Every structure is written in structure tokens, then in C-alpha cells.
Image: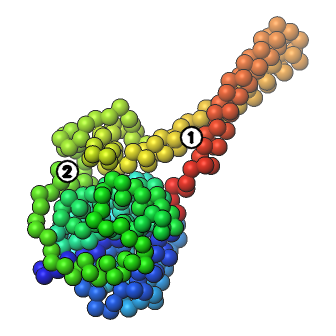
Amino acid sequence: MTHRDILAIGTSAGGFDALRFLAGEFPQDFPASVLVVIHLSSQFRSALDAILTQAGPLPATFAEDGEKLKRSHIYIAPPERHLLVESEHLRLGSGPRENNARPALDPLFRSVGLCCGQRAVGAVLTGTLGDGAAGLLALKQCGGITVVQNPSDAAFPEMPTSALALSKPAHMVSLVSMPALFAKLVRQPPGDPTPLPEGIEYEVNIARGGRGSMNEMDRIARRSVLACPDCHGVMWEIDEGELVRYRCHVGHAYSAELMSLALDENLTRALGSALRALDERIAVARKLQKQASDAGRTRAAESWTSKVHEFEQEAKVIRDSVRRTDEIAARLPPNRS
């Protein structure tokens, strides 16, 4: 291979406009395959392939499993499947969600690194939260060149900010500067092969749909005291310098920030269930109090009146907690766009 022939791009909130701009700037003879992951809803059919095709000279299609990579072509991860690269072919992974998303950015970057890191360029664009930072770091460790959109230039700066802080990319540029940079980078000779990061092959296999292993997780990480927000199993903490993330042996994976948000969501659901149970208990106690009062059982009626008051105080504590968590959640950015 005479040059870097794979460009992997990940984005989320604000990504439609960013991708449409880039598609309009790619030359017709762009000498690389362009792989795109954007967090798409599975509830509606996306026309992103048609939008990107109309925006510029390169054809854009949703990737198909087993498809052979072609240069001067844009491949988009379809909803609910991880986009992976294996040798010279695309694979659509059915593994668990990562950072509460499928497709997720991290599996794409890791698979590109495992397959052909020294031939690759990876870029993180606008988006919320931190998906992509761990994968971009893995791609860099595999010999890939990494690029991050300048957070001050991004419609949503959180994803570029996380990638910038945690993966220390080779380039940070504005969106308008990316086409010229990509054109330069993909024409550079591939780098020298480098040792693969520990555990990357295992994590790519999980994204593909392979089985998890407690023994393998014990080898590459340490057990934490946290339970997985998805399956409630044990989570392992993976420490990569400034980057801390979590993965269970089933395969669910979270950055530390997203783990915090997921636990907040679990807490909100638990508080809601507790409040519902308390309100039902109050309703039953009031019914029993009325029955005792109508039957002239004064002592029983007074006892149930006291219980109603006690249950109402307990419900007030939970209701106030729900209100506070809702107020905190309202000040946080949306989980996905």
C-alpha cells in the first residue's frame, strides 16, 4: 500500500450538517474509503445516504455486511449495527451497545486500528458526551493519524473536547480546514506497524457479536464495585491514563461520564418506582381508614389516619428527590441527538 487509504469519521449531534459539508468537498478521485458513524435513530428510515450522495461527487451508501471496500466511496453505519472493518471488507456487528449507542464510534475506530491502523486516518467531529475518545486513542496506538474538530468550531463541543483531552490527537482543526487536511493525510505513506493495544482484538470481537469472557476481562481490566446499567452484571474498570471506562463481560461499555449519566437514569427509574409504591400504599391506607371510620371502629380509624400521615411524609421525601433529580437532568445536555 502506497498511502493511507481509510478515513474513519465519527460524529453525533450536529453531524448531519458537518458530514454534508465534507461530502461536498471531497474530490471525485479521493484515494481512500470513507467510513462514517453517526448516532442514528432506528425509529425512522434515514436518507443520509441520498443526502451525502447529492452533496458531492462521491457515492454514499449504508454499509452491507461482507461488502468489499472501494476507494472514493462513503460507507455509512446503518442503525442498530456497529460498523467494523475486517481485512478489506466491511462487517456489521450485532454486539451490545457502547456508550448507550449502536452504532458507536469506538468500535469503528478500534476495528480500523486492529485491521489496518498504519493505513488509517480517524476523525471525531461535533457531538455530545464522550463516544469516540477511547476508540480514537486505540487507533492512534495502532499507528493511525488522528484528527479532532476544534471544539470552539463544533456545533456541539463535548465530543471533540473529550477526544482532544483523552486521545491527544495529531491534528485539531476547524471543519472548513478538514477537507484540505484529509486530502493531504490520505496521500501520505502508511506508517510502520506498531504493537496492538492490549485487549483491542477482544473488544472488536465483542462489537462483532462474539461472546464475552470474565477471564479475558480480568486479564485486561480490574473489577469495579459498579453494576452494569443494562444487564446489572459486574463491570470492569479499564484505566488508560486519563481515560477511564467501564465494560461488563456481556459487552456493554461506558465512558466514565456516560456511566455516571446511566446510573442517574437508573436512580430516576428507581425513585419513580418507589414513589408509585408509596402512593398506592397511601391510597390503600386511606380506604382502610374510611372503612374503619364508617364501621365506628374509632381506634382502628385513628391508627390508619396516623399511618396515612406517616406514608405521606415518606412519599414527600421521595417526591422531593425526584424533583431535584429532574432539575439536575434538565441542566444536562441531551444524551443523544
Q: Quadrant of the N terminus?
A: bottom left
Q: Is residue 265 above or below residue 76?
A: above
- Give the crowd class for mark 1: few <14, some 14-19, many >=20 residues within 10 Å: few
Q: Which mark is residue 199?
A: 2
**Image point (43%, 75%), residue name:** 175
From the top left corner, tell me how far across and down residue 63 is, in percent: 33, 76
From the top left corner, tell me how far across and down residue 61 is, in percent: 37, 81
Q: With 299 as the anchor, is 203 left or right in this view?
A: left
196 or 185: nearer the viewer: 185
Q: Is residue 126 above or below residue 260?
A: below
Whether pointer 1 and pointer 2 mark residues with C-beta atoms closer than 8 Å, the reply is no
Q: With 54 as the anchor, is 233 left or right in this view?
A: left
Colour scheme in use: rainbow
**Residue type (three-letter) at the residue carrying disc 1:** Arg
The residue that disc 1 covers is 269
**Image point (25%, 54%), residue name:** 203
**Residue type (three-letter) at the residue carrying disc 2:** Gly
- Badge 2 marks a residue whose secondary structure is loop
Q: Is residue 131 above or below residue 112?
A: above
Of circles 1 and 2, the one toward us is 2
From the top left corner, tell me how far across and down residue 81 is, in percent: 36, 65
Q: How many marks?
A: 2
**Quadrant housing residue 49:** bottom left
Q: CA distance from mark 1 to mark 2?
A: 34 Å
**Image point (89%, 11%), residue name:** 296
Q: Which mark is residue 86?
A: none
- Give the crowd class for mark 2: few <14, some 14-19, many >=20 residues within 10 Å: few
**Image point (36%, 58%), residue name:** 164
